[in-house]
Amino acid sequence: MSLAEEAERHWVRLTLLAWALVAVSILWSRYGSIYWLALGDTDDNMRLMQVRALLNGQRWFDLRNHRLNPPVGFDIHWSRLVDLPIAGLILALRPIVGPVWAERWACGIAPLLPLSLAMLGVGATVRRLVSPVAWPAAILFLMCCPATLMMFMPERIDHHGWQLAMLSLTVAGLCDPARRRGGALVGIASAASLTIGLEMLPYAAMAGGILALRWVWDRAEAVRLEVYALTLSAGSAIGYAGFQGWDSSVLRCDALTPVWLTAMILAGGFLFLLARLDPASRALRLALAVAAGAIVAAAFAHAFPQCLGRPEQVSPELERNWLNNVREAKPIYRHPFRAAFPIVALPVVGVIGAAFATWRARGAALRTAWVPVLLFDTFAALMLLWQARAGPAAQLLAVPGVTALAWWLIPWVQRRTSVAVRVLGTAVAFLLVSGLFAGLIVRWLPIDRPKAFIRRVDHATGLCLTRPALEALNRYPAQTVFTFIDLGPRLVTITHHDAVAGPYHRNGPAILDVQHAFSRSPAEARAIMRRHGATLLLVCPDMAESTNYRARAPGGFYDQLAHGRRFSWLRQLPLVRGDPLRVWRID
């Protein structure tokens, strides 16, 4: 059997082997992060705290975090679905490496698990659309997606990696020639993603719209639509019943609550009914699909008018002072060119490649299979104009189009007669198609290089979040610490202390209290701290959040503290030499 035949026949096994090699390589290169438990994002720290609480006896449906804003705590509104692999790894590794290292290795390994599904998804897609042996190229180009890969790196235990994996499987299901299997894959993947969180709701809606349009165009797609409708509705119901917390039983708009469960069941019911009716007239199918969509939208607006705005449902003050300033929630064009260009380049190439492949596709079946990918690519690229956080999904969805473009372009270059053209042309073609040229441009050209102030802030922020810096606080008895919002989750993860607030919208009142304390008068700051039962004040000079308080409230409590003013009710306590943090006893 030839190498090509082996690659075609055993592609699943070989893809998993490639994933294992990639995973081992990443674990080796990121060992330092594993050793230091370098959970760089606040959400990663909160995820670990949620898993710890579960393993320490917190009930399955109780997702209230009691280490922030004690003694009341707050509901993080995440599901238990992503907790399972992390908790399972910890339990499996404890007898082998002990409890401390079990947690470290679990946080290192867990994010790599969904990468295997993402690789299988893109592999299946390009096998069907480009060539049965094109899956290694798709894996190679997936490794060229920096924003996407960051979501699968060790310690990135937040839920985004699993949602990206579900998105990859969704695209594979859309172009699956086996209609029942494809419909089931899209429905299950969409339901799982919505169970994890609502970040991918626009993509799930896009997938449902594409399946409905395919049925409108081709009656044979009725079976795919029917199975999708059933699995979406049933999967959403199972996800809600099995993995959502008690606090998600109310009509909130930020998770798979009865609001979105009702919407999924209603939409699935209408789609199932349409597929069963399946009129012969294409015009009638289109009219029924539009009417069903209008009924679902009208029913949603009538039953849940509170969810027509921002799903977080925060106060105007919190939206103005915090939520609107979250960097990843801003459009990509509001980010510096140095950061934005490497994110945008690959999705643009992916759209071009998908459009090119759709145009060149031979046969109606292949062209019809490419259209959903083109629509998804275009949609994801346009999502960047709404929020920069769409970058990982946009790069992932670009892989099939990029692979198709490379599958044509590189052989075309290789057929040139000049050796120099073949060698240099192949290298240039790869850099252009993979999007790697964008990283080279921003690296070598003096474009938007960070100023000294930004470098100082980034350096200070990084130092204060390290385990050695925070562990010094464990020399003092466990108590409630009043500190920055972005420092709270890391503090409770590394130390035995509690904190007041973290950057989570359901923690909104506590967030405002922290902002008010640092921005208003010293007397008001002391009153807020005492109301929360805080007995320690912790700050990180030059941390990014601290610069906001100084800029927005000159003369406020934090600005005075940063200028060295002393207060009778604060007594500075010692930490280890060289520690970047500053701590005071609150009297």
Image (cartoon, grey):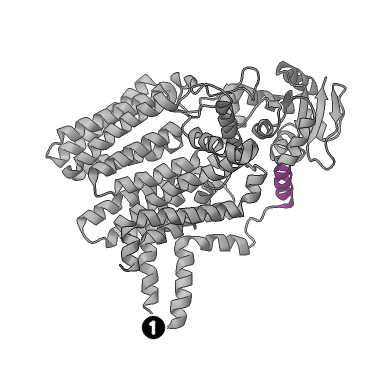
Tell me what residue is drawn at x 56 percent, y 53 percent: 26
Left or right for 189, reference 563: left
Residue at (34%, 52%) from the top-left corner?
124
Amino acid type shown at disc 1: Thr
Magenta-highlighted residues = 451-463
Foreground residue among 475 and 103: 103
What x and y, as percent, mark residue 565?
A: 86, 30
Q: Position of residue 389 (x, y in %)?
A: 51, 43
Look at the image and tell me whether residue 72 can be seen.
yes
- Foreground pick, 458 / 76: 76
On whether residue 317 falls in the magenta region, the answer is no
Q: Position of residue 147 (x, y in %)?
A: 52, 50
Using the rendered view, name the quadrant where residue 297 is placed. Answer: top left
What kind of secondary structure does the magenta stretch mostly adopt? helix
Coordinates of residue 374 in the picture (x, y in percent): 34, 52
Q: Quadrant of residue 470?
A: top right
Q: Which residue is mark 1?
A: 417
Considering only vertical position in the picture, is 404 above or below 560? below
Q: Residue at x 32, y 57 (%)?
A: 127
Residue at 46% x, 53% y is 19
Quadrant of the image containing the N terminus: bottom left
Spot the residue most to the bottom: 418
Q: Quick check: 453 left or right of 368?
A: right
**SS under mark 1:** loop
